[in-house]
Image (spheres, helix red, strand yellow):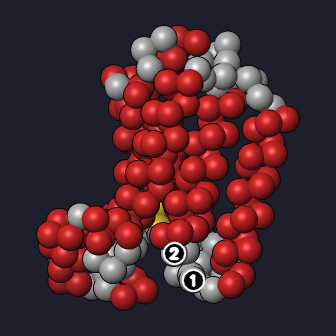
Amino acid sequence: MNGNCHFVFAGAVGVSASLLFGLDETQTTLMIATSLIGGIFPDIDNPKSNMGQLSKPVSTIIGKIGNAIGKSGTHHRGIFHDPMLYAIGLIFTYLYFPPLIGFFIGAFSHLFLDMMNPSGIRLCGVKFLRLAKVPSGSKESVVLTWIFTFIVLGASIFYKGTFAENSAMILSTL
Ligand SMILES: [Zn+2]
């Protein structure tokens, strides 16, 4: 999926998480902002992506390393598209630095959308994960993103505050 799709969907996921967890205004702002950054972060290994443009010297170096180990072009999805990386990050932030949780939620929204592409993603660099074969940047990918966006927003409005009590402990530190 392209950067715009990731940005829109990550924003929606950030809003949804805020609704589900019953966050206040400050927490919601932080959740959405970090989710948006997390939503475009995984493409840091692709110098042509939004995230790659923002972090040019870094993304160029990461891209070159990727090329050297054979992860270029459509196969650029290496370590930064590995769910394991973000699962570990999510556990650490949950335990030690909850304000950054939104970043990892956003990153997962990115991986979810990328699973809709023919090139998919890989778990632990091995297990191939793909849910559909919608080409990145196609009209279909945009439509699909909006469908997911409305589903996520609709569901969170319906289930608003469902996790508010369970998350009270985490939120007190947010
Ligand atoms: Zn990606």
Quadrant of the image occupied by residue 143: bottom right
Q: Point out residue 59 in the picture as x, y percentages from the top left corner.
A: 23, 70
Quadrant of the image occupied by residue 82: bottom left
Does any portion of residue 105 appear in the rendered image? yes
Q: CA distance from mark 1 to mark 2?
A: 5 Å
Label 2 sits on what residue type?
Asn
Per the image, label 1 sits on a secondary structure element best described as loop
Q: Is residue 83 above or below residue 18?
A: below
Q: Residue furthest right?
A: 158
Q: Point out residue 81 in the picture as x, y percentages from the top left corner.
A: 42, 64
Instruction: Respond yes or no on whether mark 1 lies under 8 Å from ligand 1.
Output: no
- Which residue corresponds to the image point at 53% horizontal and 11% vertical from the top-left? 169
The residue at which mark 1 appears reads as: 137
The residue at which mark 2 appears reads as: 2
Q: How many marks?
A: 2
Label 1 sits on what residue type?
Gly
Q: Is residue 164 above or below residue 147?
A: above
Question: Mark 1–mark 2 contact, CB under 8 Å?
Answer: yes
Per the image, label 2 sits on a secondary structure element best described as loop
- Which residue corresponds to the image point at 68% horizontal and 67% vertical from the top-left? 145
Earlier residue among tags 1 and 2: 2
- Which residue corresponds to the image point at 43% horizontal and 60% vertical from the top-left? 40
Q: Nearer the viewer, residue 127 or 153?
A: 153
The local crowd at label 2, few if under 14, some if 14 to 19, many if 20 or more residues have their Cα within 10 Å, is some
Residue 157, numbered label? none
